[in-house]
Image (cartoon, rainbow, N blue to C red):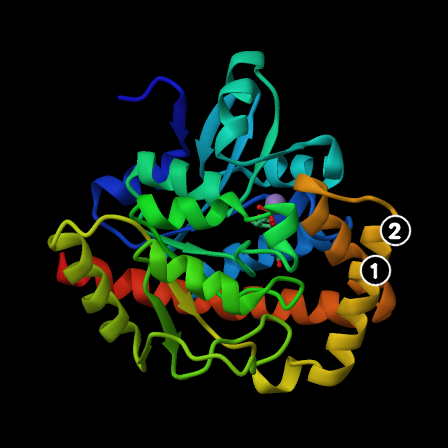
Amino acid sequence: MNPYLELSPEVKQALSDNRPIVALESTIISHGMPYPKNMETALQVEQIVRENHAIPATIAIINGILKAGLSKDEIHFLAKQGKAVIKTSRRDIPFLVSKKLNGATTVASTMIIAQMAGIKIFATGGIGGVHRGAAESFDISADLQELAHTPVAVVCAGAKAILDLNLTLEYLETNGVPVIGYQTAELPAFYTRQSGLKVDYQLNSPLEIAQFLQCKWDLNLNGGVVIANPIPEAYQMDYQQMMHTIDEALLEAKKMGIKGKESTPFLLEKIALLTSGESLESNIKLAFNNAALAAKVACELVKIK
Ligand code: PSU
Ligand code: MN
C-alpha cells in the first residue's frame, strides 16, 4: 500500500467491490471559480455522479496526504481557501507532500493520484493545452504529457479557446493520445460546441467508449484518452463574441506580464468578468454534463472488466 495515499472509506469499499468510480479534480474548485459557487458546484458534480450510479472521488492534497475521496468539510475547506491552496501539477507534488501542505490538483496531478488509487475515469471542465504563442513562450500544459503517459480517461468539454486548439491536437497526436468526440465529429471548444477542428474518432454511446478504453489498456497502449463532450446546446455561448472576449483577456494578461501557472486561472477569471458571469454559468453546466457522461462510462467499464 502507498503510504502517501489515503482513500475515503467509500472509495476504498467501491474499489474492492469493483463498483464504478469517477475521479474529480480540485483546481477547478480552488482556482477555477469564486466562492461559494465553487463549493456548490463541486458538491453538485458529486451528486450528479451519484445520480448516474457511480461513486465520486474528488482528489486533492490535504496536509501533504494524497487523497482520493473528500469529505464535505474538506471540499468546503478547499473552496473557501481558494488560491491559498497551491495549484499542484506533477512537478509540485513532492514539495506539497514533504512540507505537508494543501494542494488543489490539476488534470495532470488528478490523473496521477487516480492512477495510484486504481481509478480509470475522470471528469473535469477542460484540459490544459498548448497556449497561443507557445512557439515563443513554450507554455504547454503538463496535462498533455500526463495524458501521454498515465492510463486514465479524461471526460472534458474539449479545451478552451484561450489555447491554440490546433497545436493542442498536434501535440496529442505526437504523443499517441486519442481524442474521442462523444456524439460529435468536431472538437468542442469548452464554451462552444464548435471549433472547426476534427476529433480523431466519434463514438456515440458510453458502452462504445468503455470498449475503446478497455482495448487500449488491454493492449498495453499506456497513457490517457481525451473524451470530448460538447457543452449542451442550451448553455453554449456565442462563438464570435467569445473570440473577442478571449482576445481581450489575452491582451490584458500580456500587459500584466501574467505567465506560467497563473495564466489559466487569470484568463478564466478575466473571461468571467468580461461576460458578466455568463462564462462561469456555462463552465458549471458543462462540468455537470461531463460528470454524468463519465459516470455512465465508468458503469460500462466495470461491467466489461
Ligand atoms: N480548464 C478549465 N478550468 C480549470 C482548468 C482548466 O476550464 O480550472 C485547470 C485544470 O485544473 C487544468 C489546469 O489541469 O487548469 C491547467 O493549468 P495549466 O495550463 O497551468 O497547466
Ligand atoms: Mn502553463
Residue 266 vs 93, above or below: the answer is below
**Residue at left offset 56%, top offset 79%:** 195
User: Dot 2 corresponds to which residue?
Assistant: 255
Amino acid type, residue under disc 2 in the picture:
Lys
Residue visible at 67% across and 63% down?
162
Q: Amino acid at mark 1?
A: Leu
Is disc 1 placed on a helix, strand or loop? helix
The residue carrying mark 1 is 251
- Most extreme residue toward the top is 98
Q: Quadrant of residue 242?
A: bottom right
Give percent across and percent down for residue 1: 26, 21
Q: Is residue 87 left or right of residue 198?
A: right
Contact, mark 2 vs mark 1 (Cβ under 8 Å): yes
Q: Nearer the viewer, residue 199 or 22?
A: 199
- Could you tell me if residue 46 is visible in this image? yes
User: Residue 23's spot in the image, x, y percent?
Assistant: 42, 49
Q: Is residue 288 left or right of residue 179?
A: right
